Image: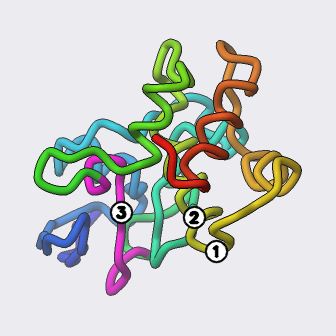
C-alpha cells in the first residue's frame, strides 16, 4: 500500500512522516516517534492503555488512524512533564502508590488530566465515571482515585 506524507504535532513538536494509511496513531507514536508511554493491550478500545489526548480530549490511539490526527494537538504521557518536572498528576500517582505494574498508568493519567481540565474539582463519583474506560488489574482503583482527588486539590 502506498504511504502518505502526514504532519503530526506531538507534545509541542511537529513531525513529518510517511505512513501507510491503515497505520494507527498508537503504532506511529510508539514505532516511528519512539514514545512508548501509550501501550497496546486489548487492541479493541476496551482497556484505555493506549489513551492519548487529541486537542485535550482522551482518545484510544489503537482505534485512531494516524492520518486522522493531522492538524490536531496530540499529547502523550511524555509531554506532561515540563523541564523534567513531573505534572501534578504524575506526582500524585507516585505519592499515592497508584502505579503498580504501570501498564495502564499513562492512559489513566491522561484521562484524569482531561477530567481535571474540564472540571478542576470533580467529585469522587465524577472521577469514577470519567475513568470508566481505563482498566487496571493491579490497584483496585482506590489509590488511583486518591491520587486524582489529591491532584484536584493541589496536593501532590
| Label whose residue precedes the other's in the sequence (3 or 2) | 3
Which callout, 3 or 2, points to the residue nearer the camera?
A: 2
The local secondary structure at tag 2 comes to helix
Badge number at residue 75? 3
Q: Is residue 96 magenta?
A: no
- Mark 3 burial class by Cα count in 10 Å: few <14, some 14-19, many 20+: many
Residue 67, above or below 113: below
Residue placed at 60% from the left, 54% from the top? 153
x and y percent of residue 63 in the render? 57, 55
Quadrant position of residue 4: bottom left
- Give me the C-alpha separation between circle 3 and circle 1: 16 Å
Quadrant position of residue 14: bottom left
| Label whose residue precedes the other's in the sequence (3 or 1) | 3
The local secondary structure at tag 1 comes to helix
**What stretch of residues is rendered in magenta?**
69-80
**What is the count of numbered marks?**
3
Residue placed at 46% from the left, 78% from the top? 55
Q: Residue furthest right?
A: 125
Return the residue at label 1.
118
Return the residue at label 2.
114
Q: Report if the CB atoms under discs 1 and 2 are less than 8 Å apart.
A: yes
26 or 146: nearer the eye?
A: 146
Q: State left or right for residue 54 relative to residue 130.
A: left
x and y percent of residue 33 in the render? 17, 50
- Mark 2 burial class by Cα count in 10 Å: few <14, some 14-19, many 20+: some
x and y percent of residue 124 in the render? 82, 47
Q: Residue furthest bottom?
A: 71
- Give me the C-alpha separation between circle 3 and circle 2: 11 Å
Amino acid at each position: 500500500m502506498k504511504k502518505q506524507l502526514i504532519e503530526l504535532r506531538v507534545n509541542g513538536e511537529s513531525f513529518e512522516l510517511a505512513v501507510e494509511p491503515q497505520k494507527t496513531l498508537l503504532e506511529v507514536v510508539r514505532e516511528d516517534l519512539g514514545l512508548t508511554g501509550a501501550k497496546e493491550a486489548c487492541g479493541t478500545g476496551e482497556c484505555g492503555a493506549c489513551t492519548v489526548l487529541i486537542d485535550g480530549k482522551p482518545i484510544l490511539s489503537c482505534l485512531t488512524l494516524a492520518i486522522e490526527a493531522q492538524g490536531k494537538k496530540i499529547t502523550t504521557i511524555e509531554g506532561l512533564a515540563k523541564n523534567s518536572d513531573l505534572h501534578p498528576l504524575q506526582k500524585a500517582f507516585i505519592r499515592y502508590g497508584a502505579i503498580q505494574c504501570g501498564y495502564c498508568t499513562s492512559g489513566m493519567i491522561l484521562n484524569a488530566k482531561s477530567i481535571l481540565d474540564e472540571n478542576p474539582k470533580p467529585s469522587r463519583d465524577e472521577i469514577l465515571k470519567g475513568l470508566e474506560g481505563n482498566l487496571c488489574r493491579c490497584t483496585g482503583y482506590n489509590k488511583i482515585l486518591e491520587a486524582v482527588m489529591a491532584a484536584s486539590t493541589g496536593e501532590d
